[in-house]
Image (cartoon, coloured by chain):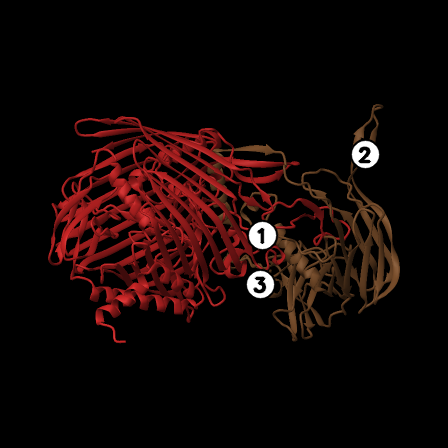
Amino acid sequence: MKTLKYLLLAMAVMMLGLASCVKDLDFDGEQTDPLLVVNGVQQVGQPARLSVEKSKFFLDAGTDFRVKDVAVDLYVNGAFKESLQVRDSIMCDIFYEINEYGEEIEVQEPIYAFNYCEGQYLLCEGDHLRFEVHSSEFETATIELNLPEAPTVLSFDMVGVDSVESGIKFSFMIDDPAGADYYNLKCINPNGSMYSFYSEDPVFVDPMGLGAEELVGESGYYGYGLYNVFTDTYFNGKPYTVYFEVFSGEYVSGEQFTIEVSRVDESLYQYKKTYDAYQESDPNGMIGMFSEPVQVYSNVENAVGVVCAQSKPVVKTIVLNKEK
Amino acid sequence: MKLPRNDFNMSWYSFFTSSELMQRYVFFCYFCNMKAKVLLLFLAMLASGWVSAQNAKKSHTISGYVTDAKSQETLLGASIFETASMKGSVTNNFGYYSLKLNEGNVSLKASFVGFEPYETAFELKNDTVINIALSQSNQLNEVTVTARAIESNVKGSQMSTIELPVTQLKKVPAMFGETDVIKALQLLPGIQSGTEGSAGMYVRGGGPDENLILLDGVPLYNVNHAAGFFSAFNSDAIKNVTLYKGNFPARFGGRLSSVVDVRMKDGDMYEYHGNFSLGVIASKINVEGPIVKGKTSFNLSFRRTYYDLFTAPLIYAISKKTLGSGQSIWGGYYFYDLNLKINHKFSDKDRLFFSLYSGDDKVYSRIKSETQSGDGFYGDMNSSQEMDINWKWGNRVAALRWNHVVRPNLFMNITGAYTQYRHNLGAEVSSETSHQFSGVTTTDTEAIGLDLNSGIYDFSGKADFDYKPFENHDVKFGLGVTHHTYKPTSLGVQMKETQSGTTSFDFDTVTSDSRIKALETDLYLEDNWDISNFFKLNMGVHYSTFTVDQKTYHSVQPRVSLRSLITESFSLKAGYAYMSQYIHLLSSNAISLPTDLWVPVTGNIVPMNAHQVALGAFYDWRGFEFSLEGYYKKMNNVMEYKDGASFFSLDQSNWQDKVVMGDGWAYGIELFAQKNVGRFTGWVGYTWSHTERLFNRPGQELNFGKVFPAKYDRRHDLNIVVMYELNDHFDFGATWVFSTGNCATLAYQNYHGLDLYGNSIWVNGQSSIGYIENRNNYRYNSYQRLDLVANYHLQSERFEHIFSVNVYNALVHNNPFVVIPWEGKLRQVCLFPIIPSLSWQVKF
């Protein structure tokens, strides 16, 4: 359905394009001031980590987002614990040029510079954290959060191998307590990078819904990366088995899959939900012209960005047994 | 003290007709609750009518039809008044009038714009039927028009209502030379267009789905062709258009913002004639005439675009040349509409009308490819693939009406109607591969078919009555029932594979959600009450129910409109209306597409409703009409898409998850000055307005629960329309449109968000997010457009030729369609920088 609508849009745009013209305009509105941006996920057993930077006006170029005189104070359970160490982090594109002597030289072009802040105190389950981010350019930004307990995972299992799709199906059972809970799943290969996975389990269905895709069997969740968050809406207060399928090519017996299940706070879920909606709306593309704008979730006072909490993960390593 | 009967009656009568007491009464009513107000006023009406009937001299009814003398076409809104008593009436939607007058000598005068006035004097002794046939005047007669103008503009009780005669409509410049009802309405104050070229209407801060578009009294769901660049109405088939943009009479219901009442021509009862026109985009033909002279007539109009007749062969030729041998594309787009009306007159008391409308848009394409390969070792292989896509959407409306004059003062109209909007997409992909090896040929085939359907289907029946119980009361009442069927998207898939003539795979399935059925009922009572020479009141109540999903919604909607005639040419009016709406249109704000879906209210999505109050001053001066209206409209349960929702991801199964409900309000001032007489005619319309939205219900917040301007909130709208008739051969027209730019949402600041998809939380360079502090925080550049038209009329013995030159956007103003950030700048996309067009029309 969506494909058909895209096709229709393409045809409509093509028809209109025949008669349209474009004109570049100078922005005559008010140029707004940059905002302080604070992001980070605080995980039990790890030191506190934040990225601090500033936003840029949407028509400006520039790669340096660092903020002057940044200082970040961490309070744990109401008491000052430490000031985070602030470092500059500069990411560069590396390319090679031939100099005047005909030698090949490495050139680094900064593409992104920000402030990276890290503490030393290892965060504990149940800690109440408060961050205060100070700088000479902005008002002090604050964020408070609680570090959740690890989830109760009753079992992990390898369900089977799908020889047609070259996928391996896994499951795990969560004993969910009453109340709203949010979980995160990731699947890691022995190199430490992420496996991508697919799940038709309803817990992963985006509340924004895919609609007609379900009709033609395209529904489901494609997970990858660090954060694949789901809620307990479908199984609140009960044990529940979640199924997912890892597939990325040929597997051999003995290959290891490390599955991590952790509990996260609501802010990470809200951020992911609105961020995915933002990406889906294609804000800078053709579809964006016909989509409603998205205001991405932010939970930092006097700044934008999101600082979230994550429990210590429950980890299970499963060795592939193709006989199963 | 015991009063004589007549004195007692007079005292009550004078209570209700004394201006001072009436004002006190209205003031008192203001503090009553609405239902009590309605009841009290109706009691007052009945009492005053009864009392005046008891008190007055014996009265009789004069009734009949007002028609065009030449064609017998009924004239809607024609004015009939008795000059001595200044009592008057206007013809209804079927050209019927009735007037209750005292016994004695009467002098009756009938008038209609563009027609010679008719006058007659006689002694009224009993109920009298006078059918009036008006002759067309060659030149606009000032007296005629002025009389009508005063009646409608100054003396009428209704406000926020504009009639647009088709003769006037046809003189307005038009895009591609296609006269367009909806686009002409957009030139009136209080009516805003959507994006450039779009046929969408935003009336007094309402959305495009809040307009009830009626074709001969039957709702039309999709009023657009070609993504909204043309409306579904063929102007050749139309007799009259009336727009109600607030303070709706009680007979209308079902939408919040406006009613556009389009009436089709009945057809000439005596002569065959018509016209044919040839334009750059479409050609039209209209024929009308008698089936049985003086008894039965027809009017038939057909319009079709023929752009595809040129583009399809061109696309084919280009594809053959550029894609190589064996590959080709054939495709195009067209729309057509057909209007048919048959009218049979059984007697002066009984008439039957049959109306039919059928309009479709269609996109079609066929992509073919053929390849041949082979060598001595593997043999020869021929393969061919073909893909057919047919996309079709459109409306069908059929209505049967019976007019019956029950009594001279009681007119009845019974209507049975069917209306549908249907969207169908069919696609077929087939391939055939034949392989010849060692003298043996094997053939494999593969075929995939896709069939996607959605629609809305209504059956309705209604009865409307016009009743003149007393000389100072015009009562309308009626009831209606509509059965809606909303058909959700259903998808049929067929797949078949054969290998060497044997079926190896066969799959055929249809997935469909169950149909949603709903029942809507309406009941109304409306009285147009001449309280005194000073006051005239139109008030009524519309009651409706809507049953869906075993849930029934009710709505009692009071409507009041009061006129105070300060002088013969100056009046003040005030009105209040409450409206309720049970259906929504899921569509893009930017463009109208066939996938737009009408959906009903549900258990979760409750009906929208709106309260509107308006005040106005109306003045006529030497053929000029002036009006100044102020309005305030409060809308409840209005719908908006959630953040990020796009109509691309909407369908009937999930739409409720993607919308939120909130409140809105709009207020503004509208100024309208019109000149209807003489060679130089036209109007100036100016609107100053504000439209805002608030979505702060728990879980349904937009803009963080703060107020934001609606997308089509525009501060200023100015439309100037001028038409000049130089002589019998040449006439010219020009429109100039200026409006404040539309609102859009721009993220003024970009920042990096937490990267959810990387392997490390610090590699977040890719996740750039636009920070939006407020929805609709940016305004496009102002919109300006000058359109011109020049018509040359050439009269021959049998034909009249009209050659037209239209220029759309003659000043080549780059009006914004959309503005997007683009490589460090803002890029504005404009449509239609200038469109010149020619058309030729032959009237026979």
Badge nearest the viewer, 2 or 1? 1
Asked if labels 3 and 1 share a chain, the reply is yes
Letter of the chain shown brown in the rendering: A
Q: Residues within 10 Å of mark 2 (few under 14, many from 20)?
A: few
Q: Is residue B719 above or below residue B634?
A: above
Q: CA distance from mark 2 to mark 3?
A: 55 Å
Numbered disc 1: what chain?
Answer: B
The answer to whether residue B303 shows anywhere in this view is yes
Q: Which residue is mark 1?
A: B708
Q: Which residue is mark 2?
A: A107
**Helix, strand or loop status at disc 3:** loop
- Residue type for callout 2: Val
**Helix, strand or loop status at disc 2:** strand
Q: Is residue B445 above or below residue A172?
A: above
Quarter location, residue B597: bottom left
Q: Which residue is mark 3?
A: B697
Q: Nearer the viewer, residue B791 or B490?
A: B791
Q: Position of residue A267 (x, y in %)?
A: 70, 61
Total numbered labels placed on residues in the image? 3
Q: Residue at x 59, y 56 (%)?
A: B702
Q: Is residue B752 above or below residue B457?
A: above
Q: Position of residue A17 (x, y in %)?
A: 49, 35
Are the residues flagged by discs 3 and 1 in contact, CB closer than 8 Å? no
Q: Color used for chain B?
A: red
Q: Nearer the viewer, residue B410 or A255?
A: B410
Q: CA distance from mark 3 to mark 1?
A: 15 Å
Q: Position of residue A57 (x, y in %)?
A: 70, 42
